[in-house]
Image (cartoon, rainbow, N blue to C red):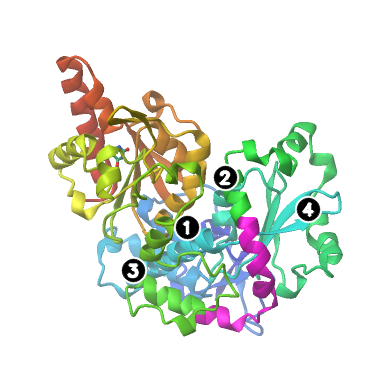
């Protein structure tokens, strides 16, 4: 028996180095064990050799294997390291192994990667914060969540981007993540009983926040970023924060008191639903464990969005225009906001810009019915002019308020790529200003989420004054869509 030691449960660098050494040392999978530091001594009594480190890689593996392995290693099954090593071992003589969907090991690895995606999506959608007062008197936010797999690090960046203006901690049984306004850091897991109720607040701050909140690291500029609440109305994310606090006050108390067991029943129900199984029975839902109002299916999200009042645009608009398309879509297209026609029809891209999009999609060989089409902002923003309603660009506050829905839509789908049609969509998806000219035409990686692809909005093509430019730009747009199709593996 040979052994490879891993520093922690998701030590991918350690796994790669160990796997490389083992392959080069001709150690067959059945003779190799993987030991994670601090995780029991499963092999007590056996004689284990530790493999020497190997400097340079002397064989190559397909890129697709490396990305699959990077996901599978986040799975909670202790067999994950061996499963991956077994695949690596066989890949050297069967370079196309991963294309064989009938191979049980390939099938298992793919199913585990899918479970990871689902777990990440659930965490993105269901983490709820409650407001607590830190010892320095300023607000901070805390959440308790129980993911099924080792995904805390894989989700940290999402929460940092989404809640940049808040100081927050997300505690889970295995790991915890912290954002102090400047640095994203990770620490050990927590116990639900450690999560503060009013009495335990002090203890919590001593144990968790105080240990990671290093005043020496906090610069004045960072402090200025953590604005007092009275300034929030000017922050793009303010509308989200207010909603979260309201939800948290009524529900998180119940969530924190509940025993952990029912969570797995809920997780099972959600899994069944994600698998397209029976619709969720209401008695399986444990509303005190999550935000009871948070939509748990795409249809629930659509129904909830129909009542949205997150910003003022709902007033003058006829209705909410939510996304349309199958949940199995490999591509999500995100436009800016519904126009006049879409506002009346209640469907995205059915007016002139939609006709232009349809034409280009057809030319690029993408079936619109198989894609999911939505907008960054779900209500039509306009200025009345006589009997006309003139389109007005949504502002940053409106885009941020509506991102709640876009994030939910994304969380219920598993696209291979997300296409931003124009700058507003790019801003909603990337959380920053986007320069179309500089960033269009190539997938922009988003960690564990599907990459974002920037291109022009179809109405830009409609507005071009001269025919020559129109033709040229249309051809470029079709070319972009063809790249998208290839990136989605279609
Ligand atoms: N423009 C958009 O961005 N979205 C639509 O749905 C229609 C026009």
Q: Which residue: 62% across, 51% down?
A: 242
Within 10 angstroms of label 3, few (less than 14), some, or many (20 or more) residues? some
Where does the image place residue 185, in percent across and percent down from the top left?
A: 69, 51
The mark lying in front, picked from 2 and 4, is 2
Q: Position of residue 90 (x, y in %)?
A: 35, 66
Which residue is identified by label 3? 106
Among numbered discs 2 and 3, the one appearing first in the sequence? 3
Q: Is residue 53 visible?
A: no
Q: Which residue is mark 4?
A: 212
- Classify mark 2: helix, strand or loop: helix
Task: Give me the residue at 58% from left, 47% from top.
Answer: 239
In terms of sequence position, does the residue under pointer 3 or pointer 4 come before the other?
3
Residue sitting nearer the eye, 88 or 122: 122
Magenta segment: 244-265
Badge 4 marks a residue whose secondary structure is: helix
Q: CA distance from mark 1 to mark 2?
A: 22 Å
> Relative to residue 177, is residue 219 depicted above or below?
above
């Amino acid at each position: 028996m040979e052994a490879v030691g891993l520093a922690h449960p998701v030590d991918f660098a350690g796994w790669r180095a160990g796997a490389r050494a083992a392959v080069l040392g001709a150690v067959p999978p059945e003779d190799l064990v993987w030991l994670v530091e601090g995780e029991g001594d499963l092999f007590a009594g056996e004689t284990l050799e530790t493999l020497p480190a190997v400097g340079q890689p002397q064989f190559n593996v397909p890129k697709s294997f490396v990305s699959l392995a990077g996901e599978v290693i986040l799975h909670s099954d202790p067999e994950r390291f061996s499963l991956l090593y077994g695949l690596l071992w066989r890949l050297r003589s069967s370079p196309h192994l991963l294309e064989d969907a009938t191979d049980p090991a390939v099938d298992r690895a793919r199913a585990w990667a899918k479970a990871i995606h689902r777990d990440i999506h659930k965490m993105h959608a269901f983490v709820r914060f409650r407001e607590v007062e830190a010892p320095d008197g300023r607000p901070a936010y805390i959440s308790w969540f129980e993911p099924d797999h080792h995904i805390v690090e894989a989700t940290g960046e999402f929460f940092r981007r989404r809640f940049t203006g808040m100081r927050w901690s997300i505690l889970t049984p295995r790991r915890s993540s912290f954002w102090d306004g400047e640095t994203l850091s990770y620490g050990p897991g927590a116990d639900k009983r450690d999560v503060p109720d009013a009495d335990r607040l002090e203890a919590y701050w001593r144990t968790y926040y105080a240990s990671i909140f290093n005043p020496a690291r906090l610069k004045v500029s960072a402090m200025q970023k953590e604005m007092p609440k009275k300034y929030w109305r000017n922050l793009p994310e303010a509308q989200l924060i207010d909603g979260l606090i309201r939800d948290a006050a009524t529900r998180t108390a119940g969530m924190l008191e509940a025993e952990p067991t029912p969570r797995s029943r809920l997780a099972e129900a959600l899994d069944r639903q994600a698998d397209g199984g029976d619709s969720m029975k209401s008695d399986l839902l444990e509303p005190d464990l999550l935000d009871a109002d948070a939509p748990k299916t795409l249809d629930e999200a659509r129904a909830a969005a129909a009542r949205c009042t997150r910003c003022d645009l709902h007033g003058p608009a006829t209705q909410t225009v939510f996304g349309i398309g199958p949940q199995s879509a490999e591509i999500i297209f995100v436009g800016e906001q519904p126009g006049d026609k879409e506002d009346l029809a209640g469907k995205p891209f059915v007016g002139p810009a939609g006709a232009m999009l349809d034409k280009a999609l057809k030319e690029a060989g993408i079936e619109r019915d198989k894609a999911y089409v939505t907008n960054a902002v779900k209500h039509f923003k306009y200025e009345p002019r006589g009997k006309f309603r003139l389109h007005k660009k949504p502002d940053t506050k409106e885009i941020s308020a509506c991102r709640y829905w876009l994030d939910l839509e994304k969380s219920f789908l598993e696209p291979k790529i997300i296409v931003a049609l124009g700058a507003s969509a790019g801003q909603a998806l990337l959380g920053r200003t986007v320069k179309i000219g500089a960033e269009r035409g190539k997938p922009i990686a988003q960690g564990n989420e599907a990459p974002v692809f920037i291109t022009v909005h179809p109405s830009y093509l409609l507005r071009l004054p001269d025919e020559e430019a129109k033709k040229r730009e249309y051809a470029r747009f079709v070319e972009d869509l063809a790249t998208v199709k290839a990136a989605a593996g279609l």
